[in-house]
Amino acid sequence: MIAHADLVITGVDVFTVDAARRWANGLAIRGDRIVAVAAREDDLSDLIGPSTERLHLPGRTVVPGFQDAHVHPAFAGRNLLRVHLDDLGSRREVFDAIGTYAREHLDEPWILGGGWAMALFPDGLPSAAELDAVVPDRPAFLMNRDVHSGWANSKALALAGIDRSTPDPWDGRIERDRTTGDPTGALHEEAAYDVWERVVPATTPEEWREAILVAQRHLHALGVTGWQDAWVRPDLLRAYRDLDDAGELTARVSAALWWDRHLGLAQIDTFVEQRAWGEGGQVRARTVKIMTDGVAETCTAAMLEPYLGADGVTTDERGRPYLDAEPLTEAVTALDAAGFQVHMHAIGDRAVRKALDAVEAARRANGPNDRRHHVAHLQFVAPEDVPRFRRLDVVANVQALWACHDAQVDALTIPQIGEERAARMYPFGELRRSGATLAMGSDWGVSSPDPLLQMEVAVTRTDPSDRDGRPLDAAEALDLPTALAAFTRGSAYVDHDDEAGTIEPGKRADLAVLNRNPFEREAGPIGEVRVELTIAGGRVVHRRS
Ligand SMILES: [Zn+2]
């Protein structure tokens, strides 16, 4: 006698993302597992018993639950609970949002939050004076959308002790008035993080848990059932651990522990400890995240060739890797030996090369293994480095939404790197053709966590807010099956979540049900497809009302 299914879904198109990229028309779930995938509905009838729930959903498409391979849910969730400037299209809206929040939270000692877009401000730089005008009474500190720059008002600068005599940290920059040398309010990289760490009140354990739960709801509503959190310090790992122990974590989470570049190899012992108490249930904690450079917008990405100056003339600035080749190689080799996956941030082509060199050295020292190291962002990759991803078994972790001519790229990036290098940005097609494994992630709160919107850009290379605009090197576009595979099985691979990523019998029941088939392009843009139902581990975690 056959055990009946708990849930049977019929009438749908199922894109299984199995090795043969097969389609099916129905599936059955028992407990947290997929027990059958059928080409014909009749093939499921034996599994239907008196207590089986049935969903007949004609016109819908089922895909594996998306996995976001590089995301900051806790930070993004915390921003949703604070001043929340994402997606605001004008400076007026930004100031209105900050002012409204400040008026509604009179008892909060600091005004905190983030998500502002550099493209809204002259030269990408907001000022302390403008922020003083809306928050005169309290310190205010707001991170930008890509979380590489901060914006402080005068009270926050004073509390942090930042004035004209404060030197720039070696891995950060304080923007200054050209004549007086006074700080103007914008702080980059370590100059911004230093304010967070020294002066801003620490986020409480309760705030972290609340932030993760808000983010989890948001991501489930977009069909995301698992992710790699790309910046996890011990207090955040504790919050994940506590939520999982309380049964509140429904997503699979791979936590990337934070490599502090100011400390050395000794911190690996602390990662081993964190892995020991942090892992279990829905949480995996055997990845370490290393920032190898900054971002192109502020010329902190490490490039092989120099940036251009304001006049379009070549400068001698090439950015600077955060870690020299030797400490980076030592770190990756030691982490690899200690059983950790390494997740490297690399934007510039010099940083990408150094990251690959480090993995190559680790492979030489430790031999081949299944750590599945990955490099995220990959805005610039030298042609000769493209085949190394496959050769070294390094996953290309791409943020597809950035691969288009949006306001930030056109206003801030291209003038500093020139059209020639811009034409080869985000070479996803080349990576794919070289046989590299692709994973996808949003980098939310940096940009939208909507997987379908990201896949639209992967396929069209065109800004979804200007769909008739010019594409960014259309030859680098991916086809939709490739993009879908990257966001499901590719990301599950990099998250070491081998029970997910495809719809096959025996796999965990992580699914997203879409309101229409994204392959039917005449029905509308991929980014306008909506997730109606999300199932994680056999449980319905989102149902669109
Ligand atoms: Zn990130």
Image (cartoon, rainbow, N blue to C red):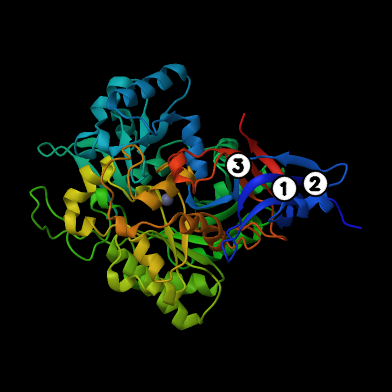
* Precedes in sequence: disc 3 or disc 2: 2
Image height of 77 relative to 498, above or below: above
Quadrant that contains the N terminus = bottom right
Can the viewer see residue 284 in this picture?
yes
Q: Residues within 10 Å of mark 3 (few under 14, many from 20)?
A: some
* Precedes in sequence: disc 3 or disc 1: 3
Residue 62, image x and y in percent? 61, 48
Label placed on residue 60: 3
Q: CA distance from mark 3 to mark 1?
A: 18 Å
Can the viewer see residue 251 in this picture?
no
* Precedes in sequence: disc 2 or disc 1: 2
Q: Residues within 10 Å of mark 1 (few under 14, many from 20)?
A: some
Q: Secondary structure at mark 1?
A: loop
Q: Nearer the viewer, residue 429 or 85?
A: 429
Quadrant that contains the C terminus = top right
Residue 102, image x and y in percent? 41, 21
Residue bearing mark 2: 6
Q: Residue at x 59, y 35 (%)?
A: 210
Q: Secondary structure at mark 2?
A: loop
Q: Secondary structure at mark 3?
A: loop
